Image (spheres, rainbow, N blue to C red):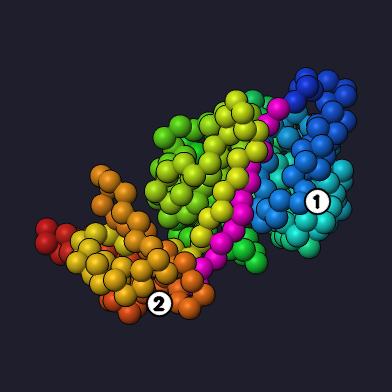
Amino acid sequence: MSRFVNVATVLFSTCAERGKKDAKDILLRETKAVLESMKGYGFDLVVFSEGVEAFGQTVDEAEELKNPGPFLKMYMEFAASEKCHVAGSIKIAENGKAHNSIAFIDAEGKALGAYHKNNLTAGEIEMGLNSGGKAVTVDTAIGRIGGIICFDLNFEDIRKQYMKLKPDIMAFASMYHGGLMQAQWAYQCRSFFVSALPFTGGGILDPFGRALALTDCYTSIASARINLDRVMVHLDYNREKFPEIRRKYKGDVIVDIPPNIGPALIYSMTDKRSAMDVVREFGLELMDDYMERSITANKNNR
């Protein structure tokens, strides 16, 4: 069944100076103002840049999910009032250790969990932050959301963990763009990729890594309506069935074939059937199943 979700990402900007006494108060005031400006738009998910925790909190000011401080309360109050999920940048304290984290807040304002940055920079370790140990996804009313932070984007081991967890959306809170790595993550995880950055070029990518909406010099909040009811299939052994699908379902099913890559995305645009229903009806082979079959065939052929 079609699963349309309105997602948004915030371009990070601040008047605060990192490490200054008033930085926390400035960040709280600025972030609250941004959240206030986002009310009434019907967003289902909002993602914030790593700059919030980097400028807004010291290690000693890390908050606990079960004992929210000012930043968590701010995210929770917005989520509850707008019936919106939030992937909020924040320092989280857990088991006596402080982490650079993304807190996942549901549409009732409750904390679902947190992802802790696995791959800290040397400077963050010297600062006293502790490294997380695994990929984290949360299942929400809008879909499965995973988190990734800044430097993490460079490491294959954490990406492979997420590939197995099959997120619908990857929330990327960062002070670094990542360039082609953003598109690689979207494609490898078969997920939408929502990045919140401190400069232009953050935004929403589809599972092929194509930009749907980006922040720029005119746009401080990038938003897009995405359909999470999708499956990725390879063109091999499937493409001859696409004309029949298009003739039968017309605009109710979208077969999206980008140039130069090899796979296609099948989207269901109706409540009458899911994308997986179409896969089963027409005997399509999923992209990951096809790749696994090829690996096995080649192994046996050596």
| Residue under the image location 26 percent in, 52 percent down | 262
| Residue under the image location 42 percent in, 43 percent down | 210
Please state the horizontal and vertical placement of residue 77, each as a whole percent of the image.
Answer: 84, 52
Mark 1 — residue? 78
Mark 2 — residue? 277
Marks 2 and 1: CB-CB under 8 Å?
A: no
Query: Which one is in front, 191 or 259?
Result: 259
| Residue under the image location 80 percent in, 51 percent down | 78
Can you see residue 200? yes
Query: Which one is in front, 219 or 94?
Result: 219
Secondary element type, mark 1: helix
How many numbered marks, from 0 up? Answer: 2
Q: Is residue 5 magenta?
A: yes
Quarter of the figure with residue 54: top right
Quarter of the figure with residue 108: bottom right
| Residue under the image location 40 percent in, 77 percent down | 277
Three-letter amino acid code of the residue under disc 2: Asp
* Mark toward the start of the polypeptide (2 vs 1): 1
Query: 186 left or right of 194?
Result: left
Residues in magenta, as a range: 1-13
Report how far apart the C-alphas of labels 2 and 1 lie in the structure: 36 Å
Query: 47 left or right of 256?
Result: right
